[in-house]
Image (cartoon, rainbow, N blue to C red):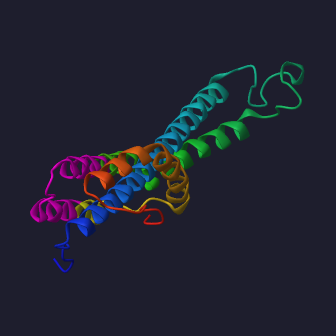
Amino acid sequence: MSDVIPQNLETRVLLLLNWRRRAIRASNAHYRSSNNCRHWSNLLTCFNIGSAIAVLFFSNNKFFGNGDGDFDQQLIFLGNSDLYTAIASLLVVLTTALQYVLKLEMKSKDAKSAGNDFTNIKREIELLLADESVPIMNAQSIQISHTHASRNHDLVPAKSWRAAKHQTERAFAEDKAFEDAVLRRFGINGPIDGML
């Protein structure tokens, strides 16, 4: 590992608080990305089902006819249902192909797993900060976990990352009491603002 954990306790505590902030932002971004993927997957599924129902409706409904019946029995603006059946069939094929190619359900599960990993890292940091000495070996373990989580999961879209930054900044404002208590406990003066 090329990064060396600082020997100085104050620096180590500040580093852990910074990692905690990063873990919070990463977990928020991954959860947001998971929700977006799940939303789009559900939307494609509903559209696919609706298109399939339209195919069945247009291909089996004598009301619309295929040009064989009386003109009076068919609605003028609907015309021949073969066109509608073909369009609905094409939509079924396209939405099915999109679901297969985009793999949104799989991406949603992966993003949720990444969010869980970063949330666990945040908890590990909080447990480590509860220890009076903040052992270097435990800090190295967290560093390894963070690196592992970062490398083994896909990056979130930039839009989710930016939105998570705003959400995280609000969480930090509410979480200020925790960070202040940690800083006081270790006798560290000064805020850690701007470390994200």
Q: Residue furthest bottom?
A: 2
Q: Is the magenta region chiefly helix, strand or loop?
A: helix
58 lies above or below 26: above
Question: At 18% from the left edge and 52% from the top edge, which residue is drawn?
Answer: 128
Residue that appears at 60% across and 46% down: 90
Residue 57 placement, left or right of 146: right
22 left or right of 122 in image: right
Of residues 98 and 87, the one nearer the viewer is 98
Q: What span is in magenta?
A: 117-145
| Front residue (pair 70, 93) | 93
Residue 77: percent from left, percent from top: 87, 32
Residue at 43% across / 66% down in the picture? 195
Picture coordinates of residue 63, whole percent (x, y) = 75, 19
Front-most of residues 72 and 5: 5
Q: Position of residue 79 (x, y in %)?
A: 82, 33
Check residue 172 for magenta coloring: no
